[in-house]
Image (tube, rainbow, N blue to C red):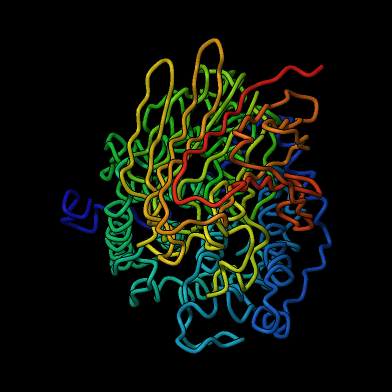
Amino acid sequence: MTEKFRFESLEDVVGLGEFVPFPAIEDRGAWDGLAGELRGRLVERGCGHIGFAWPVLPAVGYMEFDRNGNRSNFEQLYFKRRTTLSDLVIAECVEGENRFIDDIINGIWCICEESTWVIPAHNHIFKNSPEALPDTLHPFIDLFSAETAALLGLVFHLLHTRLDAVSPRICERIRREIDQRVLTPYLERDFWWMGFGSFINNWTVWCNSNCLLAFMLTEESADRRAAAVKRALRITDNFIDRYPSDGGCDEGPGYWTVAGGSLFDCLEHLYAATRGRIDVWNEPIIREIGRYIVKAHVSDDYMINFADAPACPGIDGSLVYRYGKRIEDAGMMALGAYAFNKDRHISSSYLMNRTLAAVFAWGELAECKSAAPLLRDVWLKDIQVMAAREQDGTDRGLFFAAKGGHNAESHNHNDVGHYIIYIDGKPVVIDAGVGVYTKQTFSSQRYDIWTMQSQYHNLPTVNGVQQAPGAQFTASDADYYMDDSKARLSLNIASAYPENAGIVRWDRTCAIIRGENPAVEVMDDFILAEESADISLSIMTPCKADLSRGVIRLNILDGACIRLEYDSTKLSAAIETIKIDDARLAPIWGPELYRIILTPSQSRTNDTWKLRFSREDKL
């Protein structure tokens, strides 16, 4: 885009006041025109915050992450401030009677008086020597300092006339704090997430979109606005240039919202900031990045949750719909409308840009009656993820997904060769997901966490050795095939393990068989350097399991029973119960998960093992 769109004059960039992503409070036609049902909800939400006691953010609370690894206690208060301010501002814009103004001013002042907008978990990222407290003289731009700048920028845009009527010092303070903490550092410093080095991830566009939004809403200088647009264009290019051509998000669907979704935000802001000159919606890579979220959808709220993604990450229906509308993709629009119309609820959020977009798309979305696309076959060749179901357009029957890739993916789990299975839209063989983030999650001890380890994915452990992290631990010989009768992925996963595992070759073939006797089959054909009986296959499940020789029955609550067949002359089965008390995992899986462990009855240097999953009627 940097080469394609060259700005010849400052007139190519809109001026302050011309950038109008949402109507200001004075545009009563826009705000009064919202549906009555929605207006009532938004005002009621604001009413719940009248007289709000803004929580204190003490220094020792900030230091807790450094002291004991807990990031949740501080973040809950930090985000509560921002979410409350967003709710109050939107309620004031809907009602327009100044009822919420005093509480809004208190919220603005609290946030402006914070020593830093960087959360404790991100404070150490730009330092060689981690410190428990931030360096207030050299502000770092992290995800949430950028989000805070965008939030306050939107408050300025929506309410500056009402705030100025109380005191011009309020908007002056907003603009000064945004400039010192975000705008000037954005122009003058190259942060790692900008992609000028070799690395990009969701931070690249997540930070970039919010920095650009804050610039366009609050910066008076035409020169600096133009410089910001050019910089945002280059950073967005850095992200796109390194993104897989298949559009696959290796961070998982839980992060697509802030990866592909934040790219959408970047492109929307660039389009508006340049009077429509920057328009790349028809570019294949932009279209594929959007479509990934449709390809990752299993059923209902369930998604293919490889990497740091919960099985039910939630689908931002408005975002998916609006992205789909831009690229004229019926599947994305259908999924977005389906997700939105399940309850037509717009959640309270500090992501005010997304909340306002949902508010003004509410009427259009409410009129869309569509079902989720539920694609029959998916193959993302660059990130080596496949998915398949028995029939297109329905979640009835078996669904299956598997992955190759490598163990240095963003938000990586050691999971090369891993697979998941659903029946009638309900999970049977699973990826447990990721627990509450702590200091350990993004440290050298990451893989001490059980949810990150290959033995708690549906994978072999050989001679007591699990897969290891790093780009060199990868799948090879990936081969995908699909027709009406089956879909199959074959991989050699031997090189995903260190040498001391003693694996010469481990060919894993995962397939869904369609037709009269549908099944999912997993075939492992291996050769070891030396004879061993210390081999195990793990199968993670939320289902109560009944074991008998050669057959395991996985009982789904109020649903089907899945029959898992294996060769009992070669393998024996046991079950381990895993207690779940994590605040992120328990709401999805309940108090327990189960790990089925298949082990060989005798030592061997090579063998072939086959697992077959199929439906079995309950008696």
Residue 143 image offset from top left, x and y in percent: 51, 65
Residue 562 image offset from top left, x and y in percent: 68, 27
At 67% from the left and 83% from the top, the residue drawn is 63
> Which quarter of the figure is the C terminus placed in?
top right
How many marks the image carries: the answer is: 0
At 32% from the left and 68% from the top, the residue drawn is 224
In this rendered view, identify the residue nearer to me: 571 or 260.
Answer: 571
Q: Residue furthest top?
A: 516
At 57% from the left and 73% from the top, the residue drawn is 445
| Above-or-below relation of 43 to 202 | above
Residue 144 image offset from top left, x and y in percent: 55, 65
Q: Quadrant of residue 478?
A: top left
Q: Residue 393 vs residue 436: left or right?
A: left
Residue 561 image offset from top left, x and y in percent: 73, 25
| Above-or-below relation of 205 to 299 | below
Residue 217 appears in the figure = no
Q: Residue 151 vs residue 403: left or right?
A: right
Residue 354 appears in the figure = yes
